[in-house]
Image (cartoon, helix red, strand yellow):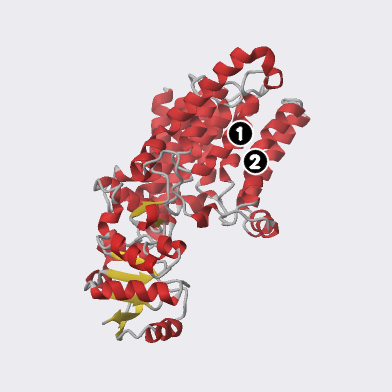
Amino acid sequence: MNKVLFYSIIILLFSLGAFLKFSDNQGSIPKGCDEFGYLNLAKSFSSNNSFSYENTRPYLKELVNVLKSDSVTAFEIAVMLTPYAYFTINDGDKVANQYPPATSYVLSLFSLGIRKKIFPAIAMFLFLIIPIVFIKQFKEIVFIDLILVLLAFFITLTAPFITELNRVNSLAFTFGFLIAAGFLLKPKPLLSCFLIAITINFRIANVLMLFPLILFVDIALFRWKDNIKKYFFTFLKYTFVVILAISPYLVYVYLLLGNPLASTYSTIDTETTFYFLSNIKFYFYSNADWFVVHLILIVILSLFLHYKKIDWKLFLKYLLFPLVSYLFFMFHKVQVDYYPYASSMILVGIVIHHASLLEIRWRISNKWIAIFSIVIALISLLDGVNRYFSKEHISFEEDSFKYKVLCQYDIVWCDLLSGTTEYVCNNNGFKYDNFTLKAKKNAISFLKEKKYTQVILLNDNMLSPSEVINEVEKMNFEYEIKEDESLGQLLIIK
């Protein structure tokens, strides 16, 4: 069978299967941080509003000045006046999305109502097509193609991969790039560097994976004085490749912040900690799915070492990828289970590369490899069909309806739904958090004077309903409480 036809069938079956299997979880309106952040940025891209999000808050600059005049902290100004995934910058007169642009840009190519549902299909498409495009030495169907198909089947069934296919995130779109980078790491480190750098457009933290790659550069790093010319040009070559790969991110940040090297993340997400025992427990015990993936891959590499397919020096170089990843996140204050994922996907590519070099005593004909691969892809599709028809589904419009009550208000004070209300209603979500009473009172008073209607969602808050009511009474605001079937109690500022 022609390899182009073979992979066209494989990609179609896996992508359709993923679309069907995860569509019931992907039909809802985004809540919280990640999903809203990526989807709302996609919405901004499609409406050409990516660099002027503060235009949705015409009162912002004046409000910030009012808060500053009463010594409200910069942290409260940055976080309180925006939904999750956004924060104010430049002394509070500009609003920025914290995430890199690549995930959102890909999603913006599709219509608003289908973006979330089509996410798993795009992820599976990229997972398969990127290694195929960059691993070119196999002109015909071989055993490694079957391994890639089995791997695709595995990630649609097993944690932690299915978790990422069940939600909009920046990981799944990079799986194929990182696997291809791992495969090409030893034979083509420059191309591997390019592929890793591309993923920085999706996840900034993937820049960490460029540091272990230095040891694979074809130059005597420890005798650089004897090779200074070669060292200099190699440095320029790799620097150029990295800048070329991350240029979409650099241009985006320049247009957004005026400085291509500025961080789009708030201080909350960049804060470090030296109390790393809780991180050890988090990543290696309580949320250890990605650690288990690392362990399995390291065991496989250990077998290659045992059977002399790789040497100790190369084995230790490979271990630097997870070592750098975990060391960094051990000192990172924010804990998220998927943070160390990138090194595991690079190790997957490394394992596939060394598996492709093995001399297999028993041989399977190309015809049977193709048939077996297509059967596996068909099973994945049937699994998706079965899941699709065994679950209830809700459309974008149906799920939007339960939030329509919020559309009559200009400002919605809440927690996880602060982004949801903006996504559905194009109004403004504020976070009613454990901020000072002074900060909240000044903001509510200012908006009240400017005739903006305001509501507080008592059942979507970090404070209990009674605590919120008590605070509103202390701030001397008149209010009324209404009950909504979907959202619970609404406290309306009169």
User: In the visual, does 280 lie left or right of 119?
Assistant: right
Q: Looking at the picture, how far across and down is residue 145, in whole percent?
A: 52, 29
Instruction: Give left or right: position of 223 versus 40.
Output: right
In percent of width and height, residue 86 lies at 39, 56
Q: CA distance from mark 2 to mark 1?
A: 8 Å
10 Å neighbourhood of mark 1: few (<14), some, or many (≥20)? Answer: few
Q: Residue at the spot x=46%, y=29% of the render?
A: 243
Above or below, 148 against 429 in this view is above
Number of numbered callouts drawn = 2
**Residue 460 seen anywhere in this rendered image of the structure:** no
Q: Secondary structure at mark 2?
A: helix
Residue found at the far front of this picture: 69
Residue 324's disc number: 2
Q: Residue at x 50, y 47 (%)?
A: 156
Mark 2 Cα shell of 10 Å, populated few (<14), some (14-19), many (≥20): some
Marker disc for residue 67: none
| Vertical relation: 473 (above or below) 72 | below
Picture quadrant where residue 71 is located: bottom left
Residue 37 visible in the displayed image: yes
Query: Residue 403, relative to residue 105: is it above or below?
Result: below
The amino acid type of the residue labelled 1 equals: Phe
The residue under label 2 is which amino acid type?
Val
Looking at the image, residue 493 lies above or below residue 213: below
Give the residue at x 35% y 86%.
476
Q: Nearer the viewer, residue 49 or 40?
A: 49
Q: Residue at x 54, y 30 (%)?
A: 181
Do tag 2 and tag 1 residues touch (Cβ < 8 Å)? yes
Q: Earlier in the sequence, mark 2 or mark 1?
A: 1
Residue 38, percent across and down? Answer: 38, 51
Q: Which residue is mark 1?
A: 211
Image quarter (top left, top right, bottom left or bottom right) of the C terminus: bottom left
Rendering coords of residue 241 (x, y %): 48, 25
